[in-house]
Image (cartoon, grey):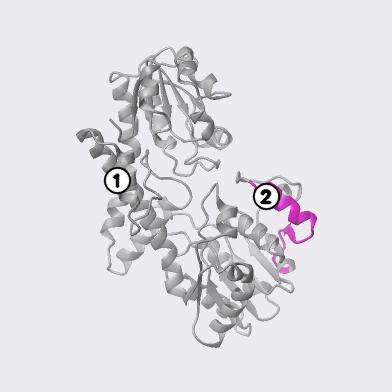
Amino acid sequence: MRIAMIGAGYVGLVSGACFAEFGMHVHVVDADPSKITALNAGRIPIYEPGLDRLVADNVKDGRLVFGTNLGAAMEGADAVFLAVGTPSRRGDGHADLSFVFAAAEQVARAATGPIVLVTKSTVPVGTGRKVKEIVTRIRPEVEIAVASNPEFLREGNAIGDFMRPDRVVVGTEEGEAGERARELLRRIYRPLFLMETPIVNTSLETAELTKYAANAFLAMKISFINEIADLCENVGADVHDVARGVGLDGRIGRKFLHPGPGYGGSCFPKDTLAVAQTARDFNSPLLLIEATIAINDARKGQMADRIIAACGGSLAGKTVAVLGLAFKPETDDMRDAPSLVVLPKLLEAGARVRAYDPVAMDHARTMLPEGIEYAEGAMDAAQGADALVVLTEWNEFRALSPAGLRRAMRGNVIEDLRNVYEPAAMRDAGFSYRSIGRP
């Protein structure tokens, strides 16, 4: 089997490397020559645990190649996957499909025979039909079958999610073209089929909406538990016990019931906006999702206000140490991270901000305002600080000694926005400690 993967970003690179690990020949193409040059030199443009080794092994074995020539990638390919970005469109929150449609045009012009074109990017309902229209308009003589095969990869766990997924969703057209695409994808995913992974075969529109519905529901669970955490603080309850008591119900599940400063990353913010806008367009507003978006947007600013209040209502002349900048651990992704809202507000309030993240600081420097100091480690950030804030729950932060932190810091305020420490241990060390949703 030969696959052409258009897009060497997060989805395309992880998917391409994993398909190669399945034994297929994968040619990943990208319009950015510098990205391809880096990949051919063995440099991975994103941080994802295990990805560097997976890419290196499959490049060495000749199953994974990178280039900028789409025609060469499509030569002899059984399937062409679209894995380009679909960021939020400025002004209205709709998904920007310009990269998807541009790639479809390039596929049409490069095609030399029948093609199966599979959309792996997260796209609104109706995109697959539009992609086929584009190809057919440019090359009416080309026999094309389109499919939707959305990804469900968690950053930091993407390889495991691809190799051992909860399900594989395949959306196809009606008729002979749909059957051709469905049969090809069945062959491509045969290793997972043999592992009895559920394969959900459905229509194009259903597959496209399934990805949005899944992400919107998970985002809603996060905003729900964050609001419950606020209530817990006001009534003296413990959100962890509440979440466990709720999550042990098999109808609800325990995942995504962890309170914090709000969700971020490459998926939830843009996908909730996109599905909410799509629903409005079809006169079926998703009021729960719109409330989820509003709650999450407000929460990030509330976290900054919480830190200022913990420091007596003023940060003038005070040093605040911030541990964690990426939106979650095991990634360097800064997109829509709470730090992008919290840190600027701390600066505006007059604080000196010293920040540390194990892998995201290079990206942070390009996205956060000037004036933030970047430390060489967690203890370096804490040195002489009046207050310390945990924004990302990297494991190395959990291992910090409370006594060691207390000796390093000038003040004793800790705002633990990820609940990585035990309240009793922090109080015993002399801290004025506050976490999310715990008394």
**Quarter of the view holding residue 193:** bottom right
Residues 334 and 90: in front is 334
Disc 2 on helix, strand or loop? helix
Determine the residue positioned at 45% across, 68% down. 208
Q: Which residue is mark 2?
A: 35
Q: Is residue 55 magenta?
A: yes
Q: Amino acid at mark 1?
A: Ile
Q: Quadrant of the C terminus?
A: top left
Q: Which residue is mark 1?
A: 295
Residue 162 location in percent, x, y? 58, 59
Above or below 11: residue 371:
above
**Quarter of the view holding residue 238:** top left
Mark pair 1, 2: CA separation: 36 Å
Residue 401 location in percent, x, y? 49, 21
Residue 27: image tag: none
Q: Amino acid at mark 2?
A: Lys
Numbered range of the magenta stretch? 50-71
Above or below 407: residue 279:
below
Above or below 15: residue 113:
below
